[in-house]
Image: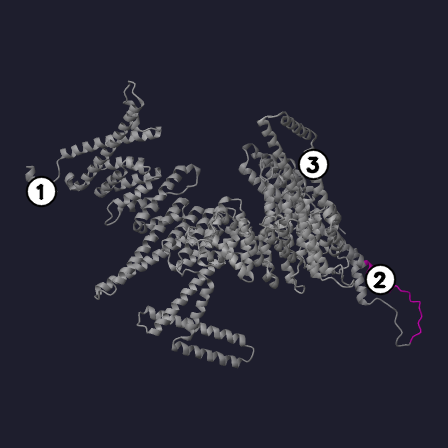
């Protein structure tokens, strides 16, 4: 009968119920086994063991057994358990596939039994819970679990909601499930649509994100954090599915969880990459199939495809808008995610051309972000934009400007005829209009002509583009014109791209000087790329970056050195593995050194020295530099010699040989230098000579001979024999060369003091004439010669002091070496023992002598004597009794310039500098002439800022050497912080910073001057003042806390603007962090209220109190000292600050002090209201008093006028006058007008008062 029914029913055959029951029993049994296995595995993980190990341990034999036997049993049991898990998973997967493939035969109408079909999914969920990694996924058969769920979803749509709910629950609970769910969405059937992915996205769109940041919603927050990665994972594998359901996710961009916003941003990035590829593929297909098909159906399909492409472009534009908007998200993680996505799109060539400029502007703007992560991503985005720019390799703006001028000229000369006629007509009309308007319109006419030509050019460009869009057949000339139009647009876009980067140079420099190593590293990498592309900002950036060679961070130093190698030594993009040619490396070094400042040269020398030490620079580079130093001219010659001297600082062998010294003599100090007065080359040669060891007197040595010749040339340089007395700039250039020449003499000469005397005598003869033929007494000395003489005099005096100290150190080292040698010989004698009686006797005598010397302290006394002699030489010999002392009276006279005879600025600077150097040598000389030095500082001309700056720097050196002598003049040094010159203030701030941090100058009493520098108009001075206070705050004795009362007191007396005072105090009060300091400072500030003379001072004190941290003791202090400040509470600003103190206290206070706070707040409000009434009453009384005074004055004036009028009326008429009849006056009487006025006044005085009954 079954066979008959099969033959009759065919494919509609359904198995009997018994078969279905048997299948259900087997599936249930398998499910139970797997459920128990997974439960044991989960329990074992929670206990730190595995189910296999526990089972093996329970099944071990109770009889002894060795350790190896136990391990082997454990391994076998673990393998058996893993095999059983895998077999069960295979069986369940086979059951799921069978139920999926034969559902029409297993169940009537293909409606499966949900209880049976859902069993594979139920066990699959448990298996996925254990798939925390690659190994765990393999062990738990995670792939099979995913396929079970996929098979169930495909075969039983009725279980879709159950599966989705279970997966969403897994996503909320476990952080490793997101990629598994994304993988599952790729396994299920996707036609007609991926139902599972759509439902999961719909569920995520319905997530409730309210209260995400609430501490009570911790599970919700962690659940959303686990769900968010699913979006980016799914978008990476199925971007079209996410794009079709993006409307479900976009509302979450306004939700609170930043992880969800960031995940959506990452998903949009994956979508844009995929859509860009799809768009490119569609365009390629259009090009391939553009010539095929001519019927209407194909035209309809092309229109449909074109509309799809337009819609796709609109969608991409909208998604890019969302990305750009999210770069200003409230959360830094989302801002960083948006920038990172833009960086990935740029790297994968998926950023549209019209988005390059806006994205670049966004990245530059985000360099000002307060979060390090966002700044790092912004810098990486800029670097990626530079690497993937759509323009040519080099981004030199001059090149593109030249191309634009050339193309514009071509386009203007080849304008189409109709546009040319219209342009000529417009120019002719403008010309006639100008002639009719008269003279005075030349500027307007020229501007109008330029506007007409620009309009004609724009019209020609628009016409060419219109012809291109209309697909017309263009002639050869029109095609060439269109090509030039494209070239013009391309060059203009490139120039705009370059100008965007150039305008952001300040932001790049700020990143480079950031205190965060990440900012510095990214900025360095950007400047390396910018240098390879030829951006002008890279040159200044790399020079600024070299200053980071002195950073305290080793990582930053290494990064700077790596950038230096990539830019100047190695091939671009090779990470320093492939070097440039030797000529190119030498040329790079010459270009770098030729345009560098003094500070940059020091950084270059440090970097170059490290490269020489690591032997990265090929030796042939220095051969090329020697050749250029010998054959080149001008700046190139000096730069080559300078680079050689820099490298010799690390490897003296470069110059410390007879052959190298001879080349240095010819190249740096030879005839070329003398003929051309090339002081830069002479200075570089002298710097190189300072790397050479001191010569030993040996006439037979070639090195000694050449050094003797070099010393003669150095003497000529120091004497200024090649100087032009008519050229001030020549003397200014000579100063640096002479300084280094004297330094080189004291380095290589065996008797530098004799050579120095020769130099001084040469200057004396040049100024005053030889001893045999002196100049006439009325001959005036040349100011430039005198300037050179004073400069050499001061520098030789200073070098003699250094030379004396070097000799003293040599003597001490020699004595120490002699003592060590004697001890070694004594110890060796003891070890050998006495071979003879005489030897033992001599050894015992030496030991006795050493013991006596040590006992009497003869060695220490000798060392002390040596130090005393050195101090005697430096104090009395150099500037006291030596040759230099012969010229100090003249030096003092010129420096004082009491009669104003010496008007040369160069002479005054040189004399003052020499005086300062001499003062650094002798304490008595310094103490004697300090008043003179400060007098010169006070009388210095306002336009001579160099003189004042030099004196300030010298005072810093004097304070280091003789602090007690300079200490009385400390206020005068602080006064230089108020100098009009920014340079002088900057130098003063720098000197005081070093003196204060080294405890050479007392800061108390003058700290107000430094506090005012926090608001200086020069950024460098402000930054240095901030640095000083920041360094002071690190000290353990809390100097800022001790200085604050003094600062408040002095600033209050200066009548500063309220904003200036408060900005200063806001910065300083940030360093008060200890509770005890806050309490004591609050008490001190409150104690100052009665001493304030104005309400503004009280308001400033209240502002300072409001910036302090508040605790219970501070509230108690406010309550106890209430009477001191209650009279000031009527002021709105004072009350506001005290109320802010209470509001801060309420946030951190204990419940016990809540009543005290409320009571204090009530007292504040009460006294503020009472004080305000008192103020109003006082103002009203003052106004009434003023009106009463006016009434009294007016009454007195009326009485005086009445008395005068009465005296005139009652004048006696007894005088008899003999006058003519016409001129005889009548008897004087009051006129009616006067009588009426007097009557009214009397009536007013007799009028009863208001409110009084008459």
Screen quadrant of the N terminus: top left
Query: Of helix, strand and loop, which one carries label 2?
Result: helix
In this orientation, does residue 635 appear? yes
Which numbered mark, 3 or 2, is in the foreground of this view?
3
Q: Residue furthest top?
A: 63
Q: Which residue is mark 2?
A: 1204
Is residue 1214 inside the magenta stretch?
yes
Q: Residues within 10 Å of mark 2 (few under 14, many from 20)?
A: few
Query: Of helix, strand and loop, which one carries label 1?
Result: helix
Q: Start and end of the magenta stretch? A: 1199-1219
Identify whether 1115 is placed above or below 404.
above
Query: Of helix, strand and loop, which one carries label 3?
Result: helix
In this orientation, does residue 329 appear? no
Identify whether 675 is placed above or below 600.
below
Q: Which residue is mark 1?
A: 9
- Name the spot of residue 1176 as percent of width and height, x first: 67, 48
- Name the spot of residue 770 as percent of width and height, x first: 74, 60
């Amino acid at each position: 009968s079954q066979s008959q029914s099969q033959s009759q029913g065919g494919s509609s055959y359904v198995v009997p119920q018994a078969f279905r029951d048997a299948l259900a029993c087997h599936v249930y049994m398998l499910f139970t086994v797997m459920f128990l296995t997974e439960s044991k595995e989960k329990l074992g993980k929670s206990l730190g063991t595995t189910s296999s190990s526990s089972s093996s341990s329970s099944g071990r034999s109770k009889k002894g057994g060795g350790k190896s036997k136990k391990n082997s049993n454990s391994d076998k049991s673990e393998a058996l358990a893993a095999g059983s898990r895998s077999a069960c998973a295979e069986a369940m997967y086979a059951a799921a596939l069978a139920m999926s493939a034969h559902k029409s035969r297993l169940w009537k109408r293909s409606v499966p039994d949900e209880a049976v079909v859902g069993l594979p999914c139920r066990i699959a969920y448990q298996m996925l819970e254990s798939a925390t990694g690659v190994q765990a996924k393999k062990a738990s058969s995670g792939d099979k679990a995913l396929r079970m769920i996929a098979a169930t979803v495909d075969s039983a749509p009725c279980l879709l909601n159950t599966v989705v709910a279970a997966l969403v629950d897994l996503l909320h609970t476990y952080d490793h499930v997101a990629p598994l769910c994304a993988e599952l969405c790729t396994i299920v059937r996707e036609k007609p649509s991926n139902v599972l992915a759509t439902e999961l996205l719909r569920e995520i769109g319905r997530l409730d994100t309210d209260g995400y940041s609430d501490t009570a919603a911790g599970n919700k927050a962690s659940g959303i954090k686990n769900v968010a990665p699913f979006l980016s994972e799914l978008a990476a594998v199925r971007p079209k599915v996410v794009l079709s359901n993006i409307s479900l996710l976009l509302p979450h961009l306004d939700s609170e969880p930043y992880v969800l916003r960031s995940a959506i941003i990452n998903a949009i990035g994956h979508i844009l990459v995929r859509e860009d590829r799809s768009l490119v593929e569609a365009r390629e297909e259009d090009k391939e199939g553009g010539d095929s098909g001519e019927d209407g159906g194909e035209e309809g399909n092309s229109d449909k495809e074109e509309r799809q492409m337009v819609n796709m472009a609109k969608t991409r534009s909208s998604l890019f808008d969302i990305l750009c908007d999210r770069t200003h998200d409230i959360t830094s993680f989302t801002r960083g995610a948006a920038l990172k996505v833009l960086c990935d799109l740029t790297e994968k060539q998926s950023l549209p051309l019209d988005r390059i400029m806006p994205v670049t502007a966004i990245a530059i703007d985000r360099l000002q972000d307060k979060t390090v992560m966002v700044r790092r991503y912004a810098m990486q985005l800029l670097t990626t934009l530079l690497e993937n720019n759509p323009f040519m390799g080099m981004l030199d703006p001059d090149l593109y400007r030249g191309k634009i001028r050339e193309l514009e000229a071509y386009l203007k000369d080849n304008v189409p005829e109709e546009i040319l006629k219209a342009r000529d007509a417009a120019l002719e009309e403008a010309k006639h209009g100008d002639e009719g308007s008269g003279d005075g319109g030349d500027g307007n006419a020229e501007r109008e002509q330029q506007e007409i030509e620009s309009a004609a050019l724009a019209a020609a460009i628009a016409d060419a583009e219109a012809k291109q869009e209309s697909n017309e057949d263009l002639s050869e000339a029109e095609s060439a014109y269109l090509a030039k139009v494209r070239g013009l647009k391309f060059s203009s876009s490139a120039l705009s791209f370059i100008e965007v980067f150039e305008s952001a140079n300040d932001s790049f420099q700020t990143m480079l000087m950031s205190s965060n190593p990440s900012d510095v590293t990214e900025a360095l990498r950007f400047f390396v790329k910018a240098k390879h592309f030829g951006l002008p900002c890279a040159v200044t950036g790399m020079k600024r970056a070299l200053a980071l060679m002195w950073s305290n961070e080793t990582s930053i130093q290494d990064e700077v050195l790596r950038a230096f190698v990539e830019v100047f030594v190695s091939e671009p993009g090779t990470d320093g593995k492939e070097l440039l040619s030797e000529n190119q490396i030498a040329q790079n070094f010459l270009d770098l050194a030729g345009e560098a400042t003094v500070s940059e040269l020091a950084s270059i020398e440090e970097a170059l020295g490290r490269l020489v030490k690591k032997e990265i620079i090929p030796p042939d580079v220095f051969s090329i530099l020697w050749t250029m130093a010998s054959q080149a001219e001008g700046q190139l010659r000096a730069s080559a010699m300078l680079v050689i001297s820099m490298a010799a600082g690390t490897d003296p062998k470069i110059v410390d040989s007879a052959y190298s010294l001879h080349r240095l003599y010819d190249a740096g100090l030879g005839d070329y230098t003398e003929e051309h007065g090339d002081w830069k080359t002479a200075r570089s040669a002298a710097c190189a000579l300072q790397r050479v060891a001191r010569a030993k007197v040996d006439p037979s040595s070639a090195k000694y001979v050449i050094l003797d010749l070099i010393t003669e040339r150095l003497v000529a340089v120091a004497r200024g024999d090649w100087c032009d007395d008519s050229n001030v700039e020549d003397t200014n250039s000579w100063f640096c060369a002479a300084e280094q020449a004297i330094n080189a003499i004291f380095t290589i000469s065996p008797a530098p003091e004799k050579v120095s005397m020769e130099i001084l005598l040469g200057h004396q003869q040049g100024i005053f004439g030889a001893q045999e033929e002196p100049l006439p007494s009325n001959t005036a000395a040349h100011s430039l010669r005198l300037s050179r003489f004073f400069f050499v005099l001061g520098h030789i005096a200073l070098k003699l002091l250094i030379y004396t100290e070097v000799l003293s150190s040599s003597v001490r080292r020699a004595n120490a070496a002699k003592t060590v040698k004697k001890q070694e010989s004594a110890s060796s004698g003891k070890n050998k023992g006495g071979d003879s009686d005489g030897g033992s006797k001599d050894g015992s005598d030496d030991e006795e002598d050493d013991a006596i010397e040590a006992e009497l302290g003869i060695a220490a006394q000798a060392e002390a004597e040596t130090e005393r002699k050195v101090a005697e030489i430096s104090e009395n010999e150099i500037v006291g009794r030596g040759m230099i002392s012969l010229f100090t009276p003249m030096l003092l006279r010129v420096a004082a310039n009491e009669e104003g005879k010496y008007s040369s600025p160069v002479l005054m600077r040189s004399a003052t500098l020499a005086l300062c150097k001499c003062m650094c040598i002798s304490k008595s000389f310094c103490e004697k002439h300090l008043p003179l030095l400060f007098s010169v500082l006070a009388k210095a001309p306002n336009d001579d800022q160099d003189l004042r700056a030099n004196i300030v720097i010298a005072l810093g050196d004097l304070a280091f050497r003789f602090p007690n002598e300079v200490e009385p003049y400390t206020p005068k040094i602080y006064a230089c912080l108020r100098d009009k010159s920014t340079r002088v203030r900057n130098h003063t701030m720098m000197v005081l910073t070093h003196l204060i941090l080294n405890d050479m100058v007392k800061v108390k009493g003058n700290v107000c001057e430094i506090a005012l520098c926090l608001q200086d108009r020069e950024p460098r001075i402000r930054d240095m003042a901030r640095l000083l206070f920041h360094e002071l705050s690190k000290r353990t004795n809390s100097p800022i806390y001790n200085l604050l009362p003094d600062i408040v007191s002095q600033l209050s007396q200066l009548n500063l603007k309220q904003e200036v005072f408060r900005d200063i105090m806001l910065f300083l009060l940030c360093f008060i962090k200890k509770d005890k300091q806050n309490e004591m400072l609050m008490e001190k500030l409150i104690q100052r209220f009665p001493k304030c003379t104005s309400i503004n001072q009280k308001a400033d004190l209240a502002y300072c109190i409001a910036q302090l941290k508040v605790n219970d003791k501070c509230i108690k202090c406010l309550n106890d000292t209430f009477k001191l400040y209650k009279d000031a509470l009527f002021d709105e600003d004072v009350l506001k600050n005290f109320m802010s103190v209470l509001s801060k206290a309420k946030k951190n206070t204990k419940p016990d002090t809540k009543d005290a706070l409320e009571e204090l707040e009530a007292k504040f409000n009460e006294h503020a209201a009472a004080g305000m009434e008192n103020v109003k009453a006082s103002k009203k009384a003052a106004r009434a008093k003023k009106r009463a005074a006016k009434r009294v004055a007016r009454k007195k004036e009326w009485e005086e006028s009445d008395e005068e009028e009465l005296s005139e009326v009652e004048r006696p008429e007894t005088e008899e006058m003999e006058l003519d009849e016409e001129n005889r006056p009548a008897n004087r009487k009051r006129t009616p007008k006067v009588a009426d006025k007097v009557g009214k006044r009397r009536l007013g005085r007799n009028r009863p008062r208001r409110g009084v009954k008459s």
